Image (cartoon, rainbow, N blue to C red):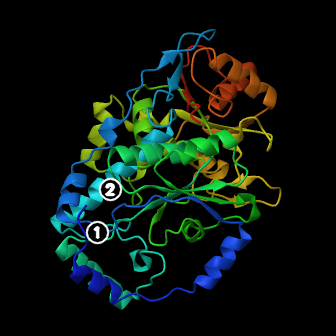
Amino acid sequence: MSTISGKVKKAYSAVRHALPLTEIDKFKKTMEWSEVKKVNGYRHFSDRAWLERVAGLDGLSNQVQVVPQPLAGQPPGVFVWDESPNKYSGTFKDRAALTIVSEYADFAKNVLEGTPLRHIDVVNLGHWPYGSNFTLDEQFPFLKFCKNTKHMPIWRVSVITSGNMGAALAKAFEQFDLPPPKILIDKSIDSEVMSALKDLRADIYAVNLPKQALYDDTKILQLTDNLGGMDLTSSPSSRSFPSPRDFYGTIAKEIFAQKPDRIYAPYGSGRLYESLLFYQDYFIHYCLPHQYAELLNLGLDKHTLTRISVIGVRPEAEDSKADKLTAHHNPFVLLPDGRSFNLLTYSRESTAALRRDGHTGPHSDIIDVSEIELERAYSSMNQEFDTCYSASAGLAGYLSDKAAGNIKEGEKIIIVNTGKGI
């Protein structure tokens, strides 16, 4: 590992100022913060060799190839989209992790080519690393100096996780030799999950998550000692809006290529639901002619794409067995009744607006299912696939609609099994 040059150290130290850490310490104390594990020996600054290696990474091409599988006991045309074979976490979270690998590659390419850095490349670099603070006048000359010398601060990734997202990021970043992720967990996390997380190449911090709603990424970055980094929990997408390449954009593209009438998917953080609706919305509002060719290559057009209904399925009960869908650490703000409303993804109201404008299918919505329906779905899904109550919620939604007579004969249905994981 090469060391950063004296000139860069001098330039960096010249613009450092102390943050009022007292306030951060008070906040950590309020959240009952503790450092569980810290990985040492990773790289803080890039050099040309690191940039050239990372620029060649392609996380997206490493994603699992899914083939829809018929579901036993259901009519022909009902298929399960199984994300459990993903090698890092055994869940769909691998897709997001590999998207971030590609973001690191884009960052390296931008520095090497001398192109203007996008906002995620310089996200909060004025506060990088924690314990420093650049004024605007100081920040940009420093970044210019770093780009000219190819010694750029390497941003770190933070995320709140109940286990699987942390596992996906840690294992993907270890494979591609990227900085360890910084993961934030609830103090009450299952002991077996905690043990599995401790084995990962990741910085781990524990807090009492229900103690306070974390309205913005700054709070999450403070709790993971990552001011100047990138928080995935509250980021609406891994790229500047608008763009079709968001956390689960590859799943959306692959599922829509199957031309189903309905897609049923678990709704927890809302990220998967967001990606599916965003893919439809993007090609109506923003896509350029060369991007529209992507639809045509998939055998789709705008009419075919927007007639597909996307149904997000969540449990009615807050203490549901589908606990990954009811966590207090989704990107959320709390409503007075205690349920969470996802501030950054599509809500029922915005989904209704998309239906009204013809930008999504006529049945697109977020629906709630009972514990009895979840139990029935899990029992069925678990016979053929690696799943859990949360991952089986899409099937619960389908069975609920089928029982209510809402499914027409001959409809093609895709039910997403997001995978069990740890």
Q: Which residue is mark 1?
A: 117
**Above or below — where is 52 with respect to 314?**
below
Q: Quadrant of residue 413?
A: top right
**Above or below — where is 397 with respect to 133?**
above
The residue at 44%/78% (across/down) is: 127
Is residue 351 visible in the rendered image? The answer is yes
Q: Quadrant of residue 299?
A: top left
Estimate the spatial distance between the alpha carbons at disc 1 and disc 2, rounded to whole Å.
Answer: 12 Å
Q: What's under tag 1, amino acid-wise?
A: Leu
Task: Report helix, strand or loop for mark 2.
Answer: helix
Percent position (x, y) of residue 7?
Answer: 22, 83
The residue at 18%/56% (across/down) is: 52
Looking at the image, which is closer to me, 263 or 175?
Answer: 175
Percent position (x, y) of residue 214?
Answer: 65, 65
- Along the horizontal axis of the image, is 61 left or right of 416? left
**Above or below — where is 377 with respect to 35?**
above
- Along the horizontal axis of the image, is 165 left or right of 251? right
The residue at 51%/28% (across/down) is: 84
Label of residue 104 in the image: 2
**Above or below — where is 287 with respect to 44?**
above
Percent position (x, y) of residue 350?
Answer: 61, 52
Task: Report helix, strand or loop for mark 1.
Answer: loop
Q: What's under tag 2, amino acid-wise?
A: Tyr
Q: Residues within 10 Å of mark 2 (few under 14, many from 20)?
A: many
The residue at 67%/75% (across/down) is: 27
Looking at the image, which is closer to me, 91 or 118?
Answer: 91
Percent position (x, y) of residue 317?
Answer: 80, 40
Is residue 244 visible in the rendered image? The answer is no
